[in-house]
Amino acid sequence: MATQVVFMVAKCVGLMIIVIGGIITLLQGNYGSFYNLESAFADTKLGISTIGMALYQCLWSYAGWYNLNNVTEEVKRPEVNLPRALMIAIPMVTILYLLVNVSYLVVMTPAEMISSSAVAVTWGNKVLGGWGWVMSVAAAFSAFGSLNGSFFSGGRVCYVAAREGHMPDILAMAHMRRLTPSPALIFNTLIALIVLIPGDFQAIVNFFSFTGWFFYGVTVSGLLYLKIKKPEIPRTITVPIIIPILVLLAAVFLVLAPIIDDPQIEYLYVTLFMLSGIVIYIPFIHFKLFPGLLNKLTVFLQLFLEVAPTAKNL
């Protein structure tokens, strides 16, 4: 976690440089595109599908919020620290990102922002001049910090799913010396590498968001069912029922929006890929077909990776 804190601080420093640079530029009387925001939306199309796509790209920037939920077992006093972290971090990040975007609009035109492969680096070259490389380093630190956080939390999802019997047993094992769920981490990395094959980052975000919000909707539907049908169940953390209702409505919109105006065949492929999990789950996990083959594979991987079943949660 110390590594994550270091890169988080580096990311925040980079963002503050952008915010301060934008404030100084404004004080110098240079308003850029921020002076006339209507021009920023020139030659754009308005539709349900385009709004959904825009929200995918926007919400991706805030996608770190769910990582904390995935590692609840790693958090001390989650009933206190989880709500506190969400209530502090999400508003803070929202305000910081809004100020960063104001700085971008002050310094760059919308065309420059769209054509730039790394907006922060382009901003740094225009504002910092010879010191523009600082933003390149900050962007690299930000990317690594995000990767580290996703790596840490994603592995725990596979680990817990396997521990509950929803995935192969090998993924519920931990390294005998380092006490990390290394099989789950390796599996998560392999899946991530497969997802990167298309190479188009925007397409990856769109398809991942489509899938993610579908499962967010399913999860929140389960929460609403339990709150209504089984209110007597003890709960460590509770929220007003209006919050999951709003999240469910948002999830339904974000899943349907990209396929209403301009449906693309790729979303059918994504849906079929999700359904393919049922084909694997039912025979191999639920009915445990071919147990001899799976047991041999589990033993081989257990010896090769030096892992063992965990006696308690990691």
Image: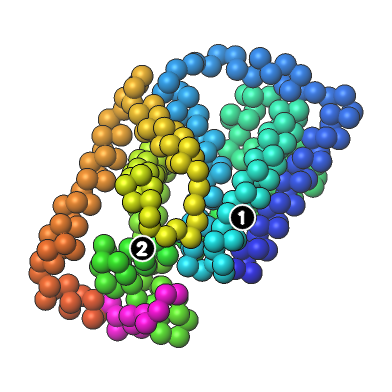
The residue at the point 76 percent across, 46 percent down is 16
The residue at the point 33 percent across, 51 percent down is 230
Q: What span is in magenta?
A: 301-314
Q: Which mark is residue 288?
A: none
Rendered view: 288 above or below 219: below
- Percent position of residue 188, x then y: 38, 61
Q: Amino acid at mark 2?
A: Cys
- Percent position of residue 134, x then y: 74, 50
- 306 part of magenta stretch: yes
Residue placed under numbered mark 2 in the picture: 158
- 115 part of magenta stretch: no
**Quarter of the N terminus within the rendering:** bottom right
The residue at the point 61 percent across, 40 percent down is 118
Per the image, label 1 sits on a secondary structure element best described as helix
How has the structure been colored for display? rainbow
Answer few, some or many: residues within 10 Å of disc 2's Cα (few below 14, many 20 plus, some between 14 and 19).
Answer: many
Answer few, some or many: residues within 10 Å of disc 1's Cα (few below 14, many 20 plus, some between 14 and 19).
Answer: few
> Number of marks in the image?
2
Rendered view: 161 above or below 182: above
Q: Nearer the viewer, residue 135 or 44?
A: 44
The residue at the point 40 percent across, 79 percent down is 312
Q: Nearer the viewer, residue 232 or 185?
A: 232
- Percent position of residue 172, x then y: 33, 72
Left/right of residue 54 with respect to residue 192 in the rendered view = right
- The part of the image, by quadrant, that contains residue 200 is top left
Q: Amino acid at mark 1?
A: Ala
Left/right of residue 2 with respect to residue 228 in the rendered view = right
Query: CB atoms at circles 1 and 2 under 8 Å apart?
Result: no
Q: Is residue 203 visible?
A: no
Q: Which mark is residue 85?
A: 1
Marks 1 and 2: which is nearer the front? 1
Left/right of residue 294 with respect to residue 109 in the rendered view = left
